[in-house]
Image: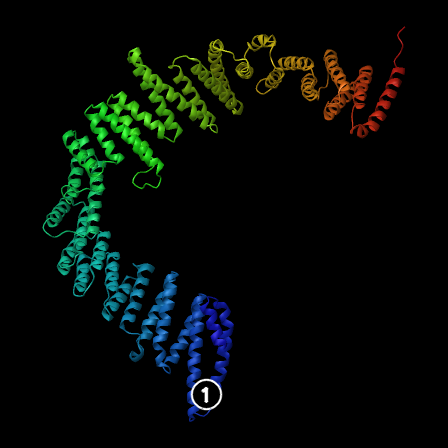
């Protein structure tokens, strides 16, 4: 039972758990074996029992060997197998089992790259397998063991164990010749740098046996990989004789051609290809899959020459490929082939031949965008603008179709835009502006990359403007319509790039520039005004986020330029209708104030004089100006206070005062007038701030809507100001400010109890100290 349990643990990969059971089984078996050996030798039952015990002993030892190998305990495994070998004399039938067990150990250690251990086990397997020929593992298995042994030596260290590897593989081939054995021998010879004579001798041995065509081809490829050209070619020449009736004979020819090309023997390769072409038309056609492989080889060779600008040589290889097509055959690959040939003819300035090739491509694949591109190139070369434009229109439609069908494997999603871009470039190089404009128009509809699209639009605008300038006035309407289309496109793109401010600004500026060439009607003026405002807003936002002063200055200056132009357009636009509810005046004021203040513009105060005089300026606008005046890098406290005072005046003039908004504005004014942490405050400033507090108190007294937290803040600021005055010996002022704080305390709601006891006590203490302080002040005579 322990033996079976131990074997079970080994089989499930838990060899360490098996050891205890196997040791227990071994202990029981050895005790029983000792008792049987001590018994009578003449009893038949004793002999039978002894034989059974020896079988069990053999099994347990073999299981322990398995466990040891699994745990990588080589020495323990060797000891177990040696004891098994000792028992084989009594159990010859177990010879095959033990030989295969050692082979399995050899496989396991080989796969783990423990080559030394693997070579030992494989040698043991072979030796054990020969111990009793009656119960041998058989020649095929012996050869298999020897092949793996040779492979182990080969991969372990070919240079160090070359002789052992060759000895093992030669022995394997003598025991049972197998293609794998032959192949391995050739591989070992090649790796060892054997002479051509040794290789030819090994190949000669092989030729006497039946081998498959694929095996022969693999052998030839192996020779080619190791650079044994002469041996490989001689071997390839000998192979066709053995497979004359095989339909796969073309594979040999194909490999022969590859062999020649890889060894830079193009002339011989061409001769071989010409033989194949002749055979193709004399009843010796290649199998379809072989022919496809040959086409690939021919096209690769042609492409190589094309890249090297050897266009005539490229045509030669393409013509070989064409030779395998029958006249009138329709095939998309043939269309591609003809287009490639047309490209070569273009470079060779052989226009007529290029036209013929393109016609063939149109016949085979008329709806290909690549075919349309070839037609386009012909039209440009012929200076046929109408035909070129027609081809561009077809390309644009096909590009649109390919973008709508993403599963279309024939055309990559970028192919259409790439070809349209190339078409525009070709037209420009050939001074065909109308064609280039059409190509760029379609390109601008399909480009996804904003930088490329921006470049395309700029180029398109320049071309169209030069065309407009050259035309008579009555012919300009159509081009003006096109400019309007581009303007809308640039505007839409600007809006799309809201997450990329720089790109958004570029498209708004481009849209404005385009609009300058359109009639200055109301719609165009509105578009111009909006583009400039948006561009200025983007520049201001980017300026706020920049860290270096130089970058900030550049962006704020750009914004100011846009605003100056926008103001001029706005003046004209306001003459065209009623814009009372339009926020443009406010935006222009705020944007210009921010730009000038952050540029430290010396004319800022003069600019603001006209602002203070505006009767319709809103409170919110004044509050924003106050905030911007103190926003880094700007710092204009005087302008800030003036804006806040103006805002407070407007608040007071409202039919119903908004106490919340009033409190926030007053809070800001007190903060800017009386900053926290000052060690000395001018009397005039204190008087000014006192007035603000009194103003606040009057509002607090007249409404219940004043925010309690703002009242608390006012109380705290007044009280702290009084305490500060006390510490510097200004007792009268201290009494005034602390008293002011107490007045605000009376208006607190739920928070009053939290502060009242403390403040009343402290205020009494302050008054007491003030009285005593006054007693020490001498009366003036």
Q: Position of residue 308 (x, y in %)?
A: 22, 36
Label 1 SS = helix
**Residue at figure coordinates x 37%, y 80% from the top left:** 88
Image-quadrant location for residue 42:
bottom left
Image-quadrant location for residue 524:
top left
Q: Is residue 525 above or below residue 41?
A: above
Q: Position of residue 569 (x, y in %)?
A: 46, 12
Q: Is residue 108 above or below residue 274?
A: below
Image quarter in which the C terminus is found: top right
Q: Is residue 457 left or right of residue 530?
A: left
Q: Is residue 53 above or below residue 233?
A: below
Q: Position of residue 56 (x, y in %)?
A: 44, 80
Q: How many marks?
A: 1
Residue found farthest to the bottom: 42
Residue 551 seen in render: no
Residue 543 seen in render: yes
Q: Is residue 444 left or right of residue 670?
A: left
Q: Position of residue 111 (x, y in %)?
A: 37, 61
Q: Residues within 10 Å of mark 1 (few under 14, many from 20)?
A: few
**Residue at figure coordinates x 38%, y 15% from the top left:** 518
Residue hosting label 1: 37
Image-quadrant location for residue 360:
top left
Q: Is residue 23 above or below residue 152?
A: below
Q: Which residue is nearer to you in this view: 457 or 82?
A: 457
Q: Is residue 508 left or right of residue 252?
A: right
Residue found farthest to the front: 577
Residue found farthest to the top: 781
């Amino acid at each position: 039972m322990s033996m079976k349990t131990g074997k079970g643990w080994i089989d499930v990969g838990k060899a360490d758990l098996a050891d205890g059971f196997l040791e227990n089984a071994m202990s029981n078996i050895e005790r029983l074996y000792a008792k049987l050996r001590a018994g009578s030798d003449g009893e038949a039952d004793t002999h039978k029992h002894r034989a059974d015990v020896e079988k069990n002993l053999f099994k347990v030892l073999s299981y322990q060997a398995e466990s040891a190998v699994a745990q990588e305990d080589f020495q323990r495994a060797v000891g177990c197998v040696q004891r098994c070998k000792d028992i084989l004399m009594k159990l010859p039938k177990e010879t095959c089992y033990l030989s295969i067990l050692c082979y399995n150990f050899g496989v396991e250690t080989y796969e783990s790259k423990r080559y030394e251990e693997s070579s030992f086990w494989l040698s043991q397997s072979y030796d054990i397998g020969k111990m009793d020929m009656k119960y041998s593992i058989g020649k095929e298995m012996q050869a298999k063991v020897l092949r793996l042994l040779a492979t182990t030596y080969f991969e372990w260290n070919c240079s160090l164990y070359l002789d052992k590897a060759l000895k093992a593989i030669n022995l394997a081939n003598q025991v049972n010749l197998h293609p794998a054995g032959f192949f391995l021998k050739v591989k070992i010879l090649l790796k060892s740098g054997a002479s051509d004579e040794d290789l030819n001798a090994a190949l000669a041995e092989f030729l006497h046996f039946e081998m498959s065509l694929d095996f022969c081809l693999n052998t030839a490829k192996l020779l080619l990989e190791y650079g044994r050209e002469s041996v490989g070619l001689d071997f390839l020449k000998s192979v066709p004789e053995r497979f004359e009736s095989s339909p796969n004979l073309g594979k040999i020819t194909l490999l022969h051609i590859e062999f020649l090309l890889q060894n830079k023997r193009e002339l011989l390769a061409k001769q071989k290809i010409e033989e194949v072409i002749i055979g193709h038309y004399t009843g010796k056609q290649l199998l379809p899959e072989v022919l496809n492989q040959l086409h690939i080889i021919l096209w690769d060779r042609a492409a190589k020459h094309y890249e090297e600008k050897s266009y005539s040589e490229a045509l030669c290889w393409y013509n070989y490929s064409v030779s395998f097509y029958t006249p009138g055959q329709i095939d998309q690959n043939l269309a591609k082939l003809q287009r490639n040939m047309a490209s070569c003819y273009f470079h060779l300035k052989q226009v007529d031949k290029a036209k013929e090739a393109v016609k063939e491509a149109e016949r085979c694949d008329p709806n290909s965008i690549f075919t349309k591109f070839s037609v386009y190139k012909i039209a440009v070369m012929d200076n046929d603008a109408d035909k070129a434009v027609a081809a561009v229109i077809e390309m644009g439609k096909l590009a649109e179709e390919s973008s709508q069908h993403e599963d279309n494997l024939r055309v990559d999603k970028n192919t259409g835009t790439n070809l349209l871009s190339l078409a525009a470039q070709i037209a420009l190089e050939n001074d065909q502006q109308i064609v280039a404009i059409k190509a760029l128009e379609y390109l601008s509809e399909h480009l996804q990359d904003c930088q490329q699209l921006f470049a395309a639009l700029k180029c398109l605008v320049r071309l169209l403007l030069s065309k407009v300038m050259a035309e008579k006035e009555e012919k300009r309407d159509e081009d003006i319509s096109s400019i309007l289309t581009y303007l809308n496109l640039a505007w839409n793109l600007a809006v799309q790039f809201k997450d990329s401010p720089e790109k958004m600004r570029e498209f708004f500026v481009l849209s404005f520039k385009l609009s300058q060439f359109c009639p200055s009607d109301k719609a165009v003026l509105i578009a111009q005004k909006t583009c400039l405002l948006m561009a200025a807003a983007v520049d201001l936002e980017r300026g706020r986020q920049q860290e270096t002063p130089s970058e900030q200055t550049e962006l704020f200056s750009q914004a100011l330029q846009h605003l100056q132009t926008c103001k001029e357009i706005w003046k004209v636009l306001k003459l065209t209708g009623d814009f009372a509810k339009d926020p443009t005046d406010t935006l222009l004021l705020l944007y210009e104030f921010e730009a000038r203040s952050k540029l430290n513009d010396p004319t800022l105060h003069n600019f603001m004089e006209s602002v203070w005089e505006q009767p319709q300026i809103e409170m919110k606008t004044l509050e924003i100006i106050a905030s911007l005046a103190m926003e880094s890098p700007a710092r204009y406290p005087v302008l800030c206070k003036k804006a806040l005072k103006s805002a407070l005046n407007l608040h007071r003039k409202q039919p119903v005062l908004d106490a919340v908004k009033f409190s926030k504005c007053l809070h800001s004014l007190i903060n800017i007038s009386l900053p926290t942490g000052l060690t000395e405050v001018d009397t005039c400033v204190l008087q000014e701030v006192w007035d603000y507090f009194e103003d606040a108190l009057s509002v607090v007294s007249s409404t219940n809507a004043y925010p309690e937290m703002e009242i608390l803040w006012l109380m705290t600021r007044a009280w702290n100001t009084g305490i500060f005055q006390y510490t510097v010996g200004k007792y009268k002022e201290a009494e005034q400010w602390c008293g002011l704080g107490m007045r605000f305390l009376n208006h607190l709601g739920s928070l009053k109890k939290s502060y009242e006891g403390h403040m009343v006590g402290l205020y009494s203490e302050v008054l007491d100290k003030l009285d005593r302080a006054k007693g020490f002040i001498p009366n003036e005579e």
